[in-house]
Image (cartoon, rainbow, N blue to C red):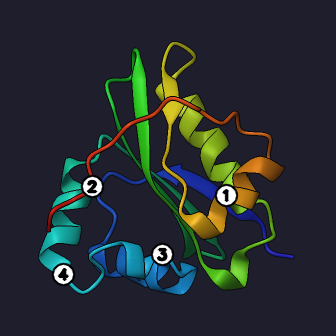
Amino acid sequence: MAEIAYGIESDLDVAEFRRVLVESGLAPRRPADDVSRLSRMLAAADLVVTARRDGVLVGVARTLTDFSFCAYLSDLAVCASAQGLGIGRGLIAATREAVGPQASLLLTAAPDAITFYERIAMPRVPDAFRYDREA
């Protein structure tokens, strides 16, 4: 089995990001066909953690954070061909390490991913509120 290399890539290529969104199944919940918007999402992210297998991007965790109090893990995507290898867990661990112990990490789970977060014992937040995107 190939080793998974985790890293921080502040200049991740938008085409690679899009491919992982599509191959992970997350594309229907993201603006995957709007490359300009994906580019802005990457440019505005404070932290982009990647997972590569044999140099090929297989996972991405895109986070907005102040590195001192809070972090919102907006996108966690792992290619379907690489799911079940612990990559999602590894991306979360690398993100938590990068944001530091003083920052809380929050995410909104896609409905199909809830069992993953339960399986890795990520605590559930009962009192969260949000406005959905209007566009």
Secondary structure, mark 4, is: loop
Q: How far, Cα to Cα, is label 1 from label 3?
A: 13 Å
Secondary structure, mark 2, is: loop
**Mark 3 belongs to which amino acid?**
Leu
Dot 3 and dot 4 residues touching (CB under 8 Å): no
- Of mark 4 and mark 2, the one earlier in the sequence is 4
Q: How far, Cα to Cα, is label 1 from label 4?
A: 26 Å
Q: Nearer the viewer, residue 11 or 111?
A: 111
Residue count near mark 2 (Cα–Cα under 10 Å), binned few <14, some 14–19, many ≥20:
few
Name the residue at 26% across, 47% down: 131
- The x, y position of residue 66, in whole percent, is 31, 24
Residue under pointer 1? 114
The quarter of the picture where the N terminus appears is bottom right
Residue 72 visible in the shown view? yes
**Mark 1 belongs to which amino acid?**
Ile
Q: How far, Cα to Cα, is label 2 from label 1?
A: 19 Å
